[in-house]
Amino acid sequence: MSDATPAAPERNDFIRQIVREDLASGKHTAIRTRFPPEPNGYLHIGHAKAICLDFGIAQEFGGRCNLRFDDTNPAREHPEYVQAIQDDVRWLGYEWAELRHASDYFEIFYLAAEKLIRQGDAYVCDLTAEQVREYRGTLTEPGRNSPYRERSPEESLDLFRRMRAGEFPDGARTLRAKIDMASGNINMRDPALYRIKHVPHQNTGDAWCIYPMYDIAHALGDAVEGITHSLCTLEFEDHRPLYDWCVDKVDLAGNPELMAPLVAKGLPNTAAKPRQIEFSRLNLNYLVMSKRKLLAMVEDKLVDGWDDPRMPTLQGIRRRGCTPSALRLLVERIGVSKQNSLIDYSVLEGCIREDLDAVAPRRMGVIEPLKLVLTNLPEGHSESLEFPNHPKDDALGTRQVPFSREVWIERDDFAEVPPKGFKRLIPGGEVRLRGIGIVRCDEVIKQGEDVIELRCTLDPETRPGGNAVDRKVKGTIHWVCANQGVAAEIRLYDRLFTVPDPDNDADGKTYRDYLNPDSRRVVRGYVEPAAAQAEPETRFQFERTGYFVTERHDHRAEAPVFNRIATLRDTWAK
């Protein structure tokens, strides 16, 4: 038998099936995709699906995927977001073939707009935004033609050039496609193609005061780059007729003169006709995904910034300690379909646990410490014990863990008045200290009503090694050496909202009313030295407690900070 790792099963969702058929038929000989975010905010977990799909399909089929910033609205965009998006894509494990911007093609878009005007497919309109809405009609009533719809191509071309020259104020005029004001698809009722905005652009400066609308920039950007499969989420399905209209009416592939500005930059003319394909979004419950609401939470200090570990942004998820492989596993697990659905948050947590269980080294950490003194060990007793880093992976090696007469245990591992079925330490009862032996609780020291110390006896005959007596006890608990354990700040993160659908603004409530007051709890605990000395963004399983990560920004060996990534089990399950 071969020792080779078995090949991963072939994925066969409807998008990959389309790609295979296009390659088999000869329609395409090379696959080109793109990930086209607008740099007006931080990416969130919903974008992870698009990233994995765009880049993943290009990888699987030996193609290329560009990262293209849809920077057509400079009033809302910022270089901070541009850098964060690049970091997020790389963190997820992908690298783009080329870094492009919609602004790289502004001259091409402008020439394409002039072509549409000359063809009689576009006109300059003087209606205000409010008037355009009035003329557009409704889902049940057709729209009305703009009074400027029959302007001659010559007049519209003159006005459009004057728009570019900066003669008119913001909102005074727009360039609109001339399609069908009676169309059942409202997107086809003479949509705007260009608007006036006297706003400097982060890449082009003051070169432009007119900017293309998303629909034409997205469609022609894909065509310029020779994208074969333009993958979008389902909300763009109604925009597909307009996407195809822009591509077909301009016909960049058939009009190479329009590509001259790109060729002048030394780039090849790869113009082609792309195909838009829509897929369902990644939606998780107990979250909000709206950039507007996320921004409001940041600005109103309901969270600690865009990378708060409770936020659904990729920056926040990374800081929380989630691994890129866990997110990729989530995307693979939920699959690709045409049906929108709300995925339970526990699916993400399950992917995190599955991923980390196999790779996260084990450490001991005590979150709610209670001192336990082994009275039959001498004062100053100290030793070093060897523990495996992982119970199922010898390749991860071992570590030395200090042990002394005094240790910290979890407060929840002791009950003065035990509930039914309690299997840990009780007055007069016995429990096994992990890797040490069996201890008996002889005395409980209290301060008022609070238990502050347990005095116990260690049975020396049950210590590991040699002829240890294997007496049976009901429970085994973990510990941290009180003399050499390191005090740590431990941030216990949980779901940001208390209800599955915080976006449901029913009964006069909003998402703000459902914020979970226990979504962030900070405690002072103790960890073994091998955990404290780890570099930032190192993940561990704290035995019997959960998965934790050394804090990305604040962790230092002398002042360690840990974020809880996930509990060992789903604490939200009914």
Image: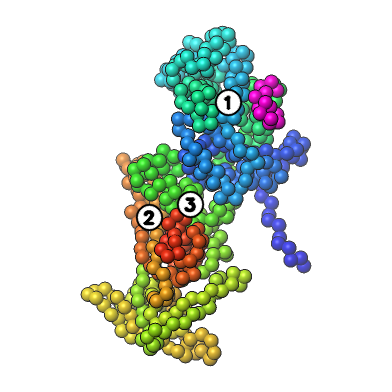
* Secondary structure beneath label 2: loop
| Camera-nearest residue between 237 and 429 | 429
The answer to if 568 sits in the magenta stretch is no
* Secondary structure beneath label 1: helix
State which tag comes first along the sequence, 2 or 3.
Answer: 3
Tell me the number on the disc at residue 317.
3
The answer to if 268 sits in the magenta stretch is yes
* Secondary structure beneath label 3: helix
Residue, disc 1? 106
Total labels drawn: 3
505 versus 137 height, above or below? below
State which tag comes first along the sequence, 1 or 3.
Answer: 1
Q: Which mark lies nearer to you, 2 or 3?
A: 3
Q: Looking at the rendering, in which quadrant would you find the N terminus?
A: bottom right
Q: CA distance from mark 2 to mark 3?
A: 14 Å
Q: Residues within 10 Å of mark 1 (few under 14, many from 20)?
A: many
Q: Position of residue 82 (x, y in %)?
A: 52, 39
Residue range of the region highlighted in magenta in the rendering: 256-270
| Camera-nearest residue between 357 and 510 | 357
Residue at left offset 60%, top offset 50%: 93
State which tag comes first along the sequence, 2 or 1.
Answer: 1
Q: Residues within 10 Å of mark 2 (few under 14, many from 20)?
A: some
| Camera-nearest residue between 355 and 11 | 355
